Image (cartoon, rainbow, N blue to C red):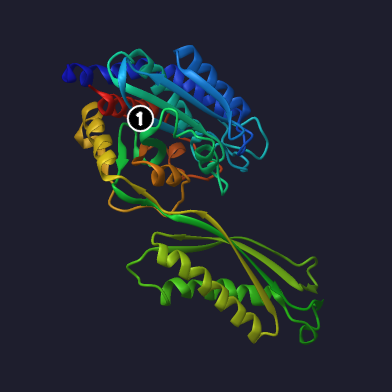
């Protein structure tokens, strides 16, 4: 019986590809920011109901949960997909480009949702095969801390029935279509944000000796903060400090009295996560003081580092081997320094977050996450949905 299931699953998922493509394009054309995903959650609820799932809506404002009960008692296996878009103006000119100014799916959550919906439709056809239940979680607001994962967990999505394990799939243009990428242990970094304000003394651009130039001081802070990474951390422990915004000054001939900097800190260890902000603050205060200015540093904690459970990851790997072939299951050597609030699910129950190949040699599908030209080869959705389905079936198989 197992061999028959393994052979038949991929062709059945391929038959659902036109629907997954249609769902993905609708979501892409109608992107919604965190906790505003009304159209996306409405589509998810509609597809789940049509497939025979028990559906709960309005969870953590716009979240959707579907429950599918098997023919016999057993554990509950969950699949999570994120729904929100980013405040980015899309530069693609495809027929399904965003119709909402300054908002686009630049991270692929439209694809993540479409894969989960495809998996939901197919799983409903096999509900008599397994013992236990499948729960599918469509989560709002992954992109902006504190995010929607914690809100959904507080709302009880891991209970009634209680979830025993959870997985999530995320599209990735750095992997080829038809493949997945997996890794046990640490797979994504902690993602924290900081704000740094340099306060000087404004004045005439022709009389710098009567002023304290906040812009000049901010430039020194930006340059020297990288010494925290280069000279104060163990080079074998990865970390990233990036400045994302800088704002200051009002006119070309006026020395600015204040500059506001914002950035992100990415770490893999709890020790570095605590240490680096203190180092940035100490350095900024020192540079500001040396130039008769003041510095104010504030930290906004984001998501902790994401770590995959070894056993659940092995089950995803095995499912990928069965439906895609061993050569298409890529064992990732290193984590990436981007963050993901799926970490809260992974800290609550055994979990695996894996990446789905949607890249090709076509340059249209080579841009990274968060780029205004991000797009992907939609054929990759088939592989992701197939692995979601196969992992759930193997986990719950009697």
Is 215 situated above or below 109?
below
Seen in the picture, residue 233 relative to 51 is either above or below; the reply is below
How busy is the neighbourhood of tag 1: few (under 14 within 10 Å), some, or many (20 plus)?
many
> With respect to residue 198, does 156 lie above or below?
above
**Residue 146 x %, y %:** 56, 48
Please report the residue visible at 76 percent of the width from the left and 74 percent of the height from the top.
Answer: 257
Position of residue 397 in the picture relative to residue 272 (left or right): left
Residue 368 in the image: state x and y as whole percent.
46, 45
Which residue is nearer to you in this view: 86 or 177?
Answer: 86
Can you give x and y, in whole percent of width and height, for residue 105 in the image? 55, 36
How many marks on residues? 1
**Does residue 359 appear in this view?**
no
**Residue 364 shows in this picture:** yes
Residue under pointer 1: 77
Which residue does the image show at 53% across and 25% down from the upper left? 25
The quadrant of the picture occupied by the N terminus is top left
State the residue in front, 251 or 157: 157
Give me the residue at 30% from left, 35% from top: 179
Q: Is residue 307 left or right of residue 265?
A: left
Quadrant of the rendered image containing residue 160: top left
Badge 1 marks a residue whose secondary structure is strand
- Furthest toward the right, the residue is 204
**Nearer to me, 31 or 278:** 278
Report the quarter where the C terminus lies: top left
């Amino acid at each position: 019986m197992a061999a028959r299931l393994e052979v038949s699953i991929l062709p059945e998922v391929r038959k659902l590809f036109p629907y997954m493509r249609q769902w993905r394009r609708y979501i892409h054309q109608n992107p919604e920011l965190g906790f505003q995903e009304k159209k996306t959650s409405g589509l998810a609820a509609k597809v789940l109901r049509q497939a025979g799932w028990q559906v709960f809506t309005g969870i953590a404002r716009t979240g959707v949960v579907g429950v599918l009960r098997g023919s016999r008692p057993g554990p509950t296996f969950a699949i999570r997909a994120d729904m929100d878009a980013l405040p980015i103006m899309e530069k693609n000119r495809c027929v399904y480009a965003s119709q909402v100014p300054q908002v686009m799916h630049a991270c692929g959550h439209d694809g993540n949702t479409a894969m989960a919906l495809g998996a939901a439709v197919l799983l409903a056809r096999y509900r008599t095969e397994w013992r236990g239940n499948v729960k599918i979680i469509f989560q709002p607001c992954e992109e902006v801390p504190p995010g929607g994962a914690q809100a959904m967990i507080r709302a009880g999505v891991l209970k009634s029935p209680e979830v025993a394990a959870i997985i999530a799939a995320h599209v990735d243009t750095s992997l080829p279509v038809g493949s997945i990428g997996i890794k046990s242990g640490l797979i994504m970094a902690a993602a924290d944000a900081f704000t740094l304000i340099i306060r000087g003394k404004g004045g005439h651009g022709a009389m710098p000796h009567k002023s304290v130039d906040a812009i000049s001081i901010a430039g020194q802070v930006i340059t020297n903060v990288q010494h925290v990474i280069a000279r104060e951390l163990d080079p074998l422990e990865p970390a990233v400090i990036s400045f994302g915004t800088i704002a200051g000054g009002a006119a070309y001939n006026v020395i600015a009295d204040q500059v506001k900097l914002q950035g992100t800190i990415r770490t893999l260890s709890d020790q570095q996560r605590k240490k680096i902000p203190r180092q940035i603050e100490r350095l900024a205060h020192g540079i500001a003081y040396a130039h008769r200015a003041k510095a104010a540093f504030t930290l906004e904690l984001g998501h902790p580092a994401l770590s995959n459970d070894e056993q659940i990851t092995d089950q995803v790997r095995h499912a990928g081997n069965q439906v895609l072939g061993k050569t298409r299951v890529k064992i990732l050597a290193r984590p990436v320094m981007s963050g993901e609030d799926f970490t809260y699910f992974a800290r609550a129950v055994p979990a695996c977050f894996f990446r789905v190949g949607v890249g090709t040699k076509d340059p249209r599908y080579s841009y990274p996450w968060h780029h205004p030209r991000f797009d992907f080869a939609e054929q990759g959705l088939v592989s992701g949905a197939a692995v979601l389905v196969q992992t759930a079936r193997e986990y719950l198989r009697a």
